[in-house]
Amino acid sequence: MFPTIWSSLDKNKNPSATDLKKIQSFMFCKWLAGDHRTIFDANLFNQYSDIPVENQYNLIKNKYAGKIRNIKYVKSEKDDVDESTITILCSHFKISIEKAKDYLQYISQEELKYLKELYAVRK
C-alpha cells in the first residue's frame, strides 16, 4: 500500500488498478496531512468522503508529482504512562482510557500515590 501511495509523487510510476484499490482513503489522507502543501487536499478528501481513492490518487499525482519529493508518514506517539495507573484512574473515576490520560496532567503525585495504595489494598 505505501509504495503505491508514495508513487503519487513520481511522474514516472503508474500503479495498476489493483494496487490503487489497496489504498485506504484514511491512510492516504493521513499521509497527505504530513506536508503543509498537501494538507488542504487531505481536508478536501475528508470532507467529501465519497470521492473514489483512484480519483484522489490521480488528483495528487497531477497536482504534485515532481514538485514534492517526499512526505513523511506521521507515526502515532507512544505513551510512557503506566497501564496500572490508567486502570486505577478509569475504575476510580469511571472514565475512559483517553480521559484518564488527560486526568494525569491535573492529578498531583500525592493523590496518585493515595489512589494506588487504596486500590492495592482492595486486590
Image (cartoon, grey):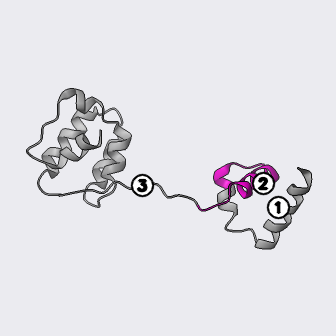
Quick one: SS at disc 1?
helix
Query: Farthest right residue?
Result: 121
Please state the horizontal and vertical placement of residue 25, each as a whole percent of the image. 34, 38
Q: Which residue is disc 2 drawn over? A: 88
Counting residues from the start of the chain, the first of labels 3 and 2 encountered is 3
Dot 3 surroundings within 10 Å: few (below 14), some, or many (20 or more)? few
Q: Does 93 sit above or below residue 45?
A: below
Dot 2 surroundings within 10 Å: few (below 14), some, or many (20 or more)? some
Q: Which residue is disc 3 drawn over? A: 75
The residue shown at (17%, 35%) is 15
Task: Tell me if 19 is positioned left or right of 42 in this view.
Answer: left
Query: Label 3 sits on what residue type?
Result: Lys
Q: What is the magenta range?
A: 80-99
Residue 85 on the magenta span: yes
Please state the horizontal and vertical placement of residue 55, each as a whole percent of the image. 22, 35
Q: Nearer the viewer, residue 113 or 51?
A: 113
The residue shown at (33%, 57%) is 34
Task: Tell me if 51 is positioned left or right of 99 in this view.
Answer: left
Query: Label 2 sits on what residue type?
Result: Ile
The residue shown at (70%, 62%) is 103
How far apart, in angstroms, are the residues tagged by discs 1 and 2?
A: 7 Å
Quick one: SS at disc 2?
helix
Mark 1 touches mark 2? (CB < 8 Å): yes
Q: Which residue is disc 1 drawn over? A: 116
Counting residues from the start of the chain, the first of labels 1 and 2 encountered is 2
Query: Farthest left residue?
Result: 12
Please state the horizontal and vertical placement of residue 67, each as a whole percent of the image. 13, 57
Query: Label 1 sits on what residue type?
Result: Lys
Q: Tag on residue 36? A: none
